[in-house]
Amino acid sequence: MKKIVIIGGGMSGLVAGIYAQKAGFESEIYERNDKAGGLCTGWTRNGHYIDNCVHWLTGTEQKTQLRRLWEETGALTAETAFVPNEAFYSSIYNGVKITLWKDLERTEREFCQLSPEDSEEIHDFIESVRIAQCRKMPVDKPMEYMSPSELMQLGKSMQGIKAVKKKYGNISLKEYVKRFKSLPIQKVMTDFYSGDSAVTSIIFSYASISCGNGEIPVGGSEKMIERMTSRYLETGGKLYLNHPVKKVHIKENEACSIELNNGFNVEGDYFICAADTYEAFYHLIGEKYIPEEWKLVYNQHSEYPVYSKFQMAISVNRDGCPIEHMTFIDCDKIKVAVSTIDRICIVSYGYESSFAPEGKLVLQIKIEQNETDYNYWSYFSEIMYQKKKQEFGKLVMEQLLIKYPELRDNYEILDIWTPRTYHTRYNAFQGSFMRFRERADVKAFASNGKFKSIPNLYIASQWLQAPGGLPTAAAAGKFAIQHILKAEGKYVLF
Ligand SMILES: Cc1cc2nc3c(=O)[nH]c(=O)nc-3n(C[C@H](O)[C@H](O)[C@H](O)COP(=O)(O)OP(=O)(O)OC[C@H]3O[C@@H](n4cnc5c(N)ncnc54)[C@H](O)[C@@H]3O)c2cc1C
């Protein structure tokens, strides 16, 4: 039996492992941390569960390719329930609150009531979201293995998407929102994705959520990963936690072994690097082997920017909590690390009573951070870093309390984390937890994860394809196994 060695037990690594077992290979996953899941994780502080990932899981709709993948890997089961969720998010600007409801008619009605002079543009936006609901990610197999008729079928199913893409072309969100006279509508459009993102970013995300294809599984990120880990182990996979990998050894254009930090070497027939791609190329595999297109992308910081967040979790009384679902509020202009901000995102996790002790719920506060902020956080010694986190945490809390004075005697800070956390724990490039942000005016970058010069080595990661996130990571893991099956001369479809 041929052996596949997988570096990294995040979403990509776990999915690769599960499909490797399913395809009859022997497989081993080497993960640097004490649990699997990578960026898809959660942790407990003072009796509260802090979910660090799933705000929405694309692919929850029945009878889609992605839903099948989630069920085959145990991420979802037929019994998995979803959190009752009425909205994508709300934005409050100058005291006016508006919401992107799952119910598109309600959103259109409320937006038009607020700003009748924008009716035509609002209608256009909602129609585009409705059309984009047909967008379902093809994850049965990589496009390169699709037959002409499968490609034609895919093209047909994506016609609506092509029309939406054509309509908005490479217009950025900040250009697009000028079409609306209402400032609160302008804000709601630019709160989730930053101004230089493509308009289609918000249209596609809102489309998934509004058609029920982007739900939150009950139990959150940690439970989802636990189910996947069990699936992998039950099918005979071997998961080595606390086993950081130092190097992939390559001889005469063939990967032969990985070297662990503890000095041991592990041999295999095939290798899948499912760690962050920067870590993979620049530390594990070596610069010599980095494909030119990847070098270019990593060197063009402004064209392919990354982003992360400064985040806090607080416990508040459940009764009278002023925040429901995800809400963006305005605040005084303040500096958090290097970035100056005037909006704060607050997410309520009140939807699951098991996440907090009785009578309490967890709120998470999220502030956008960029590459410069990451450099700022990375600069400090551990002691100074802890001090700075507390300082900025206090500053952000002051702003929150101006808006919600009722929280003043009713909150406990559970945790504060920054882009540095993601780099330290997961080797995430510049602390980024999604892949490159899609700029409207820059061609999206995509890779199939294969090396021309090293045929038994593959990359599997959310960084391979836009838009990143869990579905892209999962698809990359599955596709890596299909590439290996192809290399073995076997049928690729599971
Ligand atoms: C706050 C937050 C919210 C998010 N919300 C969503 C959401 O709502 N929907 C969505 O789809 N996505 C969301 N994401 C993104 C999602 O978590 C990621 O896209 C996905 O988990 C990436 O998976 P991956 O396998 O590509 O990478 P990773 O999760 O980075 O996995 C890589 C693994 O490799 C390990 N590793 C790294 N280096 C080594 C080494 N040298 N040796 C051994 N192991 C190593 C890491 O520890 C990690 O476990 C969110 C992420 C965060 C942080």
Image: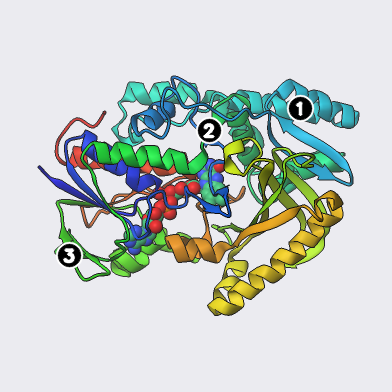
Looking at the rendered structure, the kind of residue marked 3 is: Asn
Please name which of the two marks, 2 or 1, marks the residue nearer to the observer: 2
Secondary element under disc 1, as helix, strand or loop, is helix
Marks 2 and 3, how far apart at CA: 40 Å
Q: Nearer the viewer, residue 129 or 409?
A: 409
Q: Residue at x 75, y 67 (%)?
A: 335
Asked where in the image residue 242 lies, by quadrant, the reply is bottom left
Q: Residue at x 31, y 65 (%)?
A: 284
Asked where in the image residue 67 lies, by quadrant, the reply is top left
Asked where in the image residue 145 lies, by quadrant, the reply is top left
- Give the residue pinned by disc 1: 107
Q: In screen coordinates, is 491 left or right of 123?
A: left
Quick one: label 2, few (<14), some, or many (20+) residues within 10 Å?
some
Marks 2 and 1, how far apart at CA: 26 Å
Looking at the rendered structure, the kind of residue marked 1 is: Thr
Mark 2 / mark 3, whichever is N-terminal = 2
Q: Can you tell which mark lies on residue 265?
A: 3
- Give the residue pinned by disc 2: 218
Looking at the rendered structure, the kind of residue marked 2 is: Val
Quick one: label 3, few (<14), some, or many (20+) residues within 10 Å?
some
Asked if residue 301 shows in the view, the reply is no
